[in-house]
Amino acid sequence: MSQRSLVLLKPDSVRRGLTGEIIGRIERKAGWKLVALELRTLERSVLEQHYGEHVGKPFYEPLVEFMASGPVVAMVVEGERVIEGLRTLAGPTDPIAAAPGSIRGDYGSIVRENLIHASDSEDSAEREIKLFFPGLA
Ligand code: RTP
Ligand code: MG
């Protein structure tokens, strides 16, 4: 089942020079490919839509501030079961709970600065791809 997922390499990934390493892991997954990729500093309005489900939570404001603090790499990845696969590759939200071998498990220690976002469902993927790459066929 071929799917598409929206991935953001968060500002900590870009600042720490980890984007090549992370993109490489994604590209090496058999049958997955990049169909869009851009380095972009996100407007608050885009982040408010992207993280709308978290409005009102205590971590919301610092999260939006962090995500706007520098450029991110936004991309769309296409391939077999890519939504579940990218969540597995990323590891759980808390990098300390994430297994070594996962991106968050290998490189993170702070919940907010957990390196990568990947769509969590087909509905989220559709909404997020429209938000970040409205022109993508
Ligand atoms: P994401 O949406 O970024 O892919 O991450 P996720 O699904 O694994 O986690 P989610 O629950 O959607 O939370 C979104 C992002 O908010 C930050 N966060 N901070 N307690 C905290 O300080 C806290 N909880 C969440 C993380 O950056 C998380 O990825
Ligand atoms: Mg999420």
Image (tube, rainbow, N blue to C red):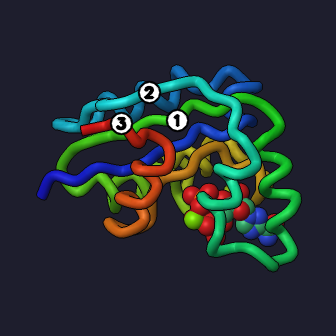
The quarter of the picture where the N terminus appears is bottom left
In the picture, measured across the screen, residue 61 lies left or right of residue 89, that is right
N-terminal of the two: label 3 or label 2? Answer: 2
- What is the distance, in whole Å, between disc 3 and disc 2 at their CAs? 13 Å
Amino acid marked by disc 3: Gly
> What residue lies at 62% left-to-right and 60% top-to-bottom?
49
> Does residue 37 lie above or below 46 as drawn?
above
x and y percent of residue 50 in the render? 60, 58
x and y percent of residue 4 in the render? 29, 49
N-terminal of the two: label 2 or label 1? Answer: 2
Task: Say few, some or many: other residues with alpha carbon within 10 Å of mark 1 (under 14 / 14 to 19 / 20 or more).
Answer: many
Kindly identify which numbered label has been placed on residue 135. 3
Kindly identify which numbered label has been placed on residue 74. 1
Amino acid marked by disc 1: Ala
The quarter of the picture where the C terminus appears is top left
> What residue lies at 76% left-to-right and 25% top-to-bottom?
15
- What is the distance, in whole Å, between disc 2 and disc 1 at their CAs? 6 Å
> What residue lies at 30% left-to-right and 31% top-to-bottom?
35
Amino acid marked by disc 2: Leu
Q: Which residue is disc 2 drawn over? A: 37
Q: Nearer the viewer, residue 43 or 53?
A: 43
Question: Whereabouts is ligand 1, in terms of quadrant?
Answer: bottom right
- What is the distance, in whole Å, between disc 3 and disc 1 at their CAs? 14 Å
